């Protein structure tokens, strides 16, 4: 999983370097969706945030040019494994939450004043901070 975290970290570093997050962005969303090639991850941001209404995550006020991370192997392995789909989705959330928390602990200034959430586009989102 360390190699998968490196893929995540390099993607996010690149994304933030090439398209820094403007101060007007107060919430960051790490979205997940299923494609014919597996699970994909992306980042977007919003200038609004409402804890009790997840519609804020649909805003694309921050829409970086390299917003998609296509190659996190562990996400696809979990998704394609046998077993209950809800357990597999929970495991995917846990992996991404671990990656985001690890990134934040190493780069606290990047998301210091931002709200952060992760979720599947067609499901619920989880607010991290």
Image (cartoon, rainbow, N blue to C red):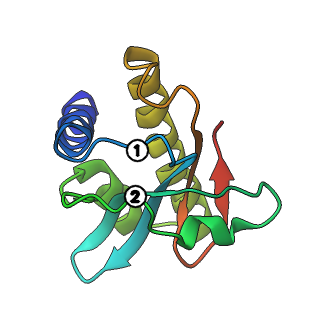
Q: Is residue 108 left or right of 68 when viewed as pictured?
A: right
The secondary structure type at the circle numbered 2 is loop
**Is residue 84 among the parts visible in the rendering?**
no
Foreground residue among 51 and 36: 51
The quarter holding residue 34 reads: bottom left
The N terminus, quarter of image: top left
Q: Residues within 10 Å of mark 1 (few under 14, many from 20)?
A: few
| Foreground label between 2 and 1 | 1
Q: Is residue 28 above or below residue 102?
A: below
Which label's residue is closer to the chain start, 2 or 1?
Answer: 1
Q: Position of residue 40 (x, y in %)?
A: 31, 65
Residue at image point 60% right, 59% down:
87
According to the image, label 1 marks what residue? 22
Residue 35 in percent (x, y) is at 30, 80
Callout 2 crowding tier (Cα within 10 Å): few <14, some 14–19, many ≥20: many
**Left/right of residue 129 with respect to residue 6 in the rendered view:** right
Relative depth, front residue between 93 and 15: 15
- Confirm whether residue 60 shows in the render: yes
From the viewer's side, name the closer residue of 48 and 72.
48
Give the residue drawn at x 64%, y 58%.
48
Q: Is residue 103 left or right of residue 29?
A: left
Q: Position of residue 53 (x, y in %)?
A: 77, 67
Task: Identify the residue at horizontal 46%, vertical 17% (top origin).
Answer: 105
- The residue under the point 47% across, 53% down is 92
Determine whether the residue tagged by mark 1 lies in a helix, strand or loop. Answer: loop
In the rendered structure, the answer to whether residue 94 lies left or right of residue 107 reads right
Task: Residue 37: give x, y in percent of width and height.
Answer: 21, 76
Residue 62 - label: 2
Q: Are marks 2 and 1 in contact (CB under 8 Å)?
A: yes
Q: CA distance from mark 2 to mark 1?
A: 8 Å
Q: Quadrant of the C terminus?
A: top right
């Amino acid at each position: 999983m360390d190699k998968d975290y490196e893929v995540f970290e390099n993607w996010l570093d690149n994304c933030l370097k090439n398209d820094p997050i403007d101060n007007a962005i107060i919430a960051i969303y790490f979205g997940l969706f299923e494609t014919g090639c597996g699970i994909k991850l992306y980042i977007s941001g919003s200038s609004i945030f409402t804890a009790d209404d997840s519609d804020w995550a649909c805003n694309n006020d921050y829409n970086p040019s390299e917003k998609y991370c296509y190659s996190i192997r562990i996400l696809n392995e979990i998704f394609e494994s046998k077993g209950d789909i809800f357990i597999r989705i929970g495991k995917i959330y846990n992996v991404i939450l671990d990656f985001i928390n690890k990134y934040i602990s190493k780069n606290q200034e990047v998301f210091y004043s931002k709200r952060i959430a992760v979720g599947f586009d067609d499901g619920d989102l989880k607010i991290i901070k």
